[in-house]
Amino acid sequence: MRGIFLTILFFMYVLQITLADTPDPYAPQFNFTYITSIYKTNPVYTNISTPFAKGDAILIEARMYGTDPSAAIPYYKQALDRTNVEEQAILFETIASLENNPSYYWASYVRWKFMRNNFRANIDYHLLNRKLIPYQYEDYPLKEIYFATPKNATTLTIGESSFTLTKKDILVSQVDRVTRDWLSSQLQDPNAKTILTIFSEKYDVEDIGWHEGGRIAQYKQAINLTHISVTGTIVRKINNNWYAPNEQGIFMFDVPLDKVQYPTTRFLREDLALIIDTHGINMLVEQAIEQNATVVMGCCDHIGKIKAALYLNERGIKVICNTDKYLPLALGQTNETLGSAPFKKQENTLLFGAQPIKINLSEKIIVLNATEYYGLSYYATSTIYFTQLQKQTLLPLDLVFVTIDDYNQLQKLVDKAEEANATVIAARVYNEDDYVVLSEWLESSEKKRIILFHSEAYPYGYLLLRNYPAQVTFDDIMPSFS
C-alpha cells in the first residue's frame, strides 16, 4: 500500500515538472485554424507598432502552426510599462499562462484588488496557489412571449421601435471588428483609439465601412459620444459549454466554441480562458456595467448573446446588434435592443429605428431562407424571425419561403414574389448583387416593401435602408398589430 502511495506521489511530481516545462500547456486541445479554414484566409502580420500587438502576432502564428509561443513573452513584458493597471493585470495573466508559471498571478491579483475587482482577484489567487477555483453558475432562460393581438387586427407594423443617443452616452463595444481584426491581419492594442472600418472583406463602398467598427466610427463622427472597447473577458467551461459572467462574477451567458478558440485567447487552465478579442454581447456584460455603459454594441448571432442583451436591457442599458441572426428569440420582450436598424442624425442626437412599414395581414410575405453553411446561414435570419412571429402570435400569416444555397441568388426571391404577385419581401443584403436585385424590384412600384435582417452592418444593406426609407425597414422585435 505504501509503495502504491509513493508511486502516485512520484508521478504527480513528474507531472508537475513536465507541466512546468511546457509552455502554453492548455492550448493544444483547441483548433486555432477553424476560423481561417472557414474564411480561406491566412493572416500575415506586418507594420505592427506596439509590444502588446507584436506579442499577439507571434502568439497567433505559433498557435496556428503549432510552434513555441515563448517568443511572444518579451513583448508582453515590454507592454507592461506602456499601459494602465487593468491591462497590466491582463498581461501578467497572459505571461503566467504562456510560461506556465503561476508566480505571475500574484502581480495580477494585486492589480485586480487595487481596482476592487474581487471576482478577478479571487480567480488569480486560486491560480497562484494551484487551487480549485470556486464559481457560481446561473441559468438565464429565454422567455417566449405570446403576442396579445387585437381580435380583429388587419395590419402588422414593423419598424416603429426606436431610441436615441447623444454625446453624453457611453458606448461599450467588443474588440473584434472594432479596434482589431486578427483574421484580416490588423492588430493594435485592444484599447487603441483608432477604429477599424475595413476588415476581411478588404474593400469599401462609398466610405461607409463594415461591421461594428464602421458604424461606431460614424456615431463618433456624428455626435462624439464616449466609446470604450472592452477586453480580457474570463470564460469558464461548465458541463462542456463555455460561459461568460455577469457583473457579479456569476457565469450565465453561453459562449460559442469558435470564439473561445480564437488564437489570441489565453488559456489559464483547461476550463478557464481569458478572451482578448471579445466578440458578442455575451462577453461584454461584466465590463459594460463596470464602465457605466448606457449602450452596448456587439454581435447577436448566438443564443447567449441574446440572453446578455436582455439582461442589459433589464438594467437600463440599450443594445445595438446589427448582426442579429438570433435576435428573433427576443420577439415581444424589449424595445431597448435594436437589430439591423438604420440611424440618422437629428441636430445633436442620433435616432435609431423609427422607419416603419405597414403590411396587411392577408398579404403574402416572401421570406428568404438559406442552407446552414457558416456565412450563408445569416441569410436565414428572416425565416427565423417570421417563423417565431407566427408561433408567438398564432396568426395565419401567409408566408412563402425561398431557400438559397449560395451567394448572389436573391433573384430567386424576386422571381417568386413576381410569380405570387406579392409586394412584401423579407431578406438580407450583404453584397452589391443583393442590393441591385432588390433595389430594381423596389423601383418598379411604390407599393413594394422589404424587411431587412442582418444588413445594417454591411455597406449595401446600409444603402438600401437609406435609399428607400419609405419602403424598407428593419427587423423590429416589437412589431405592432392594429
Image (cartoon, grey):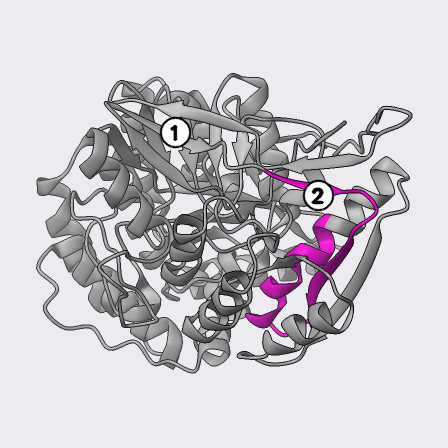
**Dot 2 surroundings within 10 Å: few (below 14), some, or many (20 or more)?**
some
Q: What residue is at 39 percent from the left and 49 percent from the top?
A: 466
Q: Position of residue 313 (x, y in %)?
A: 56, 23
Residue 431's image quarter? bottom left
> Relative to the observer, which residue lies in front, 127 or 203?
203
Q: Quadrant of residue 55?
A: bottom left
What segment is highlighted magenta in the picture?
357-385
Q: Nearer the viewer, residue 280 or 202?
A: 202
Coordinates of residue 401 in the picture (x, y in percent): 77, 65
Residue 152 visible in the current orientation = yes
Q: Indicate which disc residue 59 carries.
A: none
Compared with 385, 394 (above or below) is above
Spatial CA span between label 1 and label 2 = 23 Å
Residue linked to disc 1: 351
398 inside magenta stretch: no
Q: Is residue 81 left or right of residue 401?
A: left
Which one is nearer the viewer's eye here, 167 or 26?
A: 167
Decide if residue 265 is in sight here. Answer: no
Residue 246 vs 68, above or below: the answer is above
> Which label belongs to residue 359?
2
In front of the other: 80 or 318: 318
In this rendering, the answer to whether 226 lies above or below 462 is: above
Picture coordinates of residue 426, whole percent (x, y): 65, 56
Alpha-carbon neighbours of circle 1 within 10 Å: few (<14), some, or many (≥20)? some
* Type of amino acid under label 2: Ile
Pair 1/2: label in front: 2
Residue at the image point whose x is 48% and y is 49% from the top: 273
